[in-house]
Amino acid sequence: MNAGQYISGVAHIGLIGWALLGGTFKPAPEPFEVTEVSMISSEEFDAMTAPTEAPSLDTDLAALTPPDPEVTEPEPPQAEAPDPAPVIAEPDAAAPPPEPEETPDVAALLPPEPPGEIEDVAPVLVPPVEAPVTTAPDISDRPQTRPTTRVAPEPVAPPDPDVKIDDIAQEEAVDDGAADIQREQQEQTAEEEAATEIVTEAEASSSAPSTSVRPRTRPTQVARTEPEPDTGTKKAVNEALAQALAGGQAETETPARLSGPRLNFSEKEALRVAVGSCWVVDPGARSSSVTVTVAVTLDRNGLVEGNVVRLVSSEGGTDEMVEVAFRKARRAILRCQKQGFPLPPEKYEQWREIEMTFNPEKMRIK
Amino acid sequence: MMMRILTLLAAFVALSLPMTVQAGPLRIEITEGVIEPLPFAAPDFVAESGAARQLAQDLAQVVADDLAGTGLFRQIPDSAFISQISSFSSPVQFADWKAINAQALITGAVDLKPGGRLVVKFRLYDVFAGQELGSGLQFAGTREGWRRMAHKVADTVYSRITGEGGYFDSRVVYVAETGPKGDRKKRLAIMDYDGANVQYLTDSSSIVLAPRFSPTGDRILYTSYETGFPRIYLLDVASVRRRVLEEQDGTMSFAPRFGPDGQAVVYSVTRGGNTDIYRMNLATGQTRRLTSAPSIETAPSFSPDGSKIVFESDRSGTQQLYVMDAQGGEPRRISFGQGRYGTPVWSPRGDLIAFTKQSKGRFHIGVMRTDGSEERLLTASFLDEGPTWSPNGRVIMFTRETQGAGGQSSLYSVDITGRNLKRLKTESGASDPAWSPLQN
């Protein structure tokens, strides 16, 4: 046992003892004060007690009893004599009033002495302590995967990938046919892969990128690469390229490719809106079920060359309906070209030839 | 491993190629257009003789009114014209018409020959294409027929622009109504589709109902209470001669309608408190009962190919629409909406059925597919009923009656899109319209 426990034990025993025997050790009561009593007469006693007498109370309980309900004519209540006015005892004239002090000490009430001089100087503001600037981290703290917590007592070699993981490593039992007793087929197992030490979350390397990956600006021109001597690697790349491009080329009959940046979404949308705003659709007409694709060639000003709009293909409807749908499409293009369609001049090669499909399906009444 | 990386690299390059290299023309798809009337210019036709000056103006105005009345075209006022058409053969200054956004230009010339022969010719131009739309046409007739010639010009213009047949050179037979509601006089009347050239076919001595044109427009079936009971009459429009179609004691026959061949007629007969649909061959007079249910079957209407009949029946407890084979057989219910359906009429196009619907205290004219799908209500009022199709199946005419003791019946038309609702001008109250086919 240590000293603390000794002290605690002694203190507890002392406290219990004081609680039980505290009264025994009470100090002796103070001795009575003895004062002299002078004898007074009964008159003097009456004179002393008269002002302090309480007014006499009417103790007649009958007056408080409820009236008898059988009495038809209740008697008028008798006027009770008013309570005698309390007698205010006059102060004892014989007792002289206390003499006021001639020169009261008012020093405590005097205003304090003004300080010497007051300078009209603005206080200097103490600049607040700047809060530490907390900059947003470049990379958000993403939850990281916990590393494995299992640590083998000894580093083990990783098992073959086709081996079943088990708590106990054992070899595969294969029936060699030599034994008389056919043994149960047993699968080869290996111990689970384990590390040599525990890697905590803080120590583990994050797989998150150190900086955000932003889309890079599109190059204005595609650099033409000079042909290089064909090597084995190049051949494989070319074969893969040809394989990847096979589908796209199959869809388009035009093998020619246009170089330069393509129109972006907003540029295409502007053209779409410009033509659509002039495309008059009659939802009640049978031609509203016809989809036509027309082709135009634009000059560098965005105007249709020769006002020629060619019908490329159509879907649905009779020949007459197709003709009407084509005329509507042509009218939309020619009417809304105005001073030229709003297309970027630097991408002229991309929009020189345009095929527009007019599909009224969404506008048809159903 | 190296090959895998190279393959992946090649695929990446291949996918990134369309960003910079485009194969073929730029392709865009436009799915949102605008719904607005097509602006056209119809300057006064050129009068090629002094006598034709007024006719030249009137003809151009009727053509313009026909087109603008469809709601699909908008006439550009003459005051906006930059150039004038002074000669029918002179070339058109397309730039001047483009400048006022005229998408179609109609030019014409009128000549009134000394013998009273009227010759009207016209051309239609697609202004923005800078070319003539179709070739010029010429009509010749009498001076009295100038309105019909104007309607024919308008029909041709309408057809060339929309690709569908017109309906301007057509007529409407209806019941003309006069007098207060409690003592209303009714008689058959016929007029041009626009309310002009009204002629009365019967007097007002007896109540007449539900006139229907034959497919050729030369005959009319209607119901009359001349004998005190409803009877079906067949009237020849040219001679105004008529005959009773069927007369059997103790029966009532009504709601007749021609078949597309002009020989078959379907109608309702009430016998012994039961109403069924019958079919008659006008040439032979043979009749055939098509329905035999204890309920009320009436208002039959042939499909344009004559293979089906749509009618109304209350066999399900409420008035609904049914379709059956033209030779009879088990009908198939096609209306399932809330309310009561009646007076179905098959569209000349064959794709829609117009009907009257009563629902929640209001009447509607609506259309639905022939299988009952895609129901659309086109109108709503105190009382709309009795739809009839224009010859091209684009417009529906019907009766609208106003509420109250002084309520009047009048004829209205509405496009099948629900747009362009308008009242036809008639000399008096009018009800029960039936649209004729295009005249020859």
Image (spheres, coloured by chain):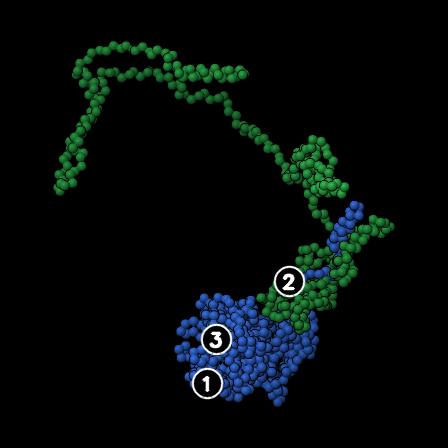
Chain colours: A green, B blue
Is B132 on the left-hand or right-hand side of A224?
Answer: left
Q: Residue at x 60, y 88 (%)?
A: B116
Q: What amino acid does circle 2 point to?
A: Thr
Q: Chain of mark 1?
A: B
* Secondary element at tag 1: loop
Residue B293 disc label: 3
Residue B366 visible at all: no
Residue A70: quadrant of the picture: top left
Q: Residue at x 55, y 82 (%)?
A: B264
Q: Chain of mark 3?
A: B
Q: Which residue is mark 1?
A: B248
Q: Position of residue B185 (x, y in %)?
A: 43, 81
**Sequence-first disc among 1 and 3:** 1
**Sequence-first disc among 1 and 2:** 2
Q: Nearer the viewer, mark 1 or mark 2?
A: 1
CA separation in Å, label 1 and label 3: 20 Å
Q: In the rendered picture of this protein, how many numbered marks are placed on residues?
A: 3
Q: Quadrant of the N terminus of chain B?
A: top right
CA separation in Å, label 1 and label 2: 60 Å
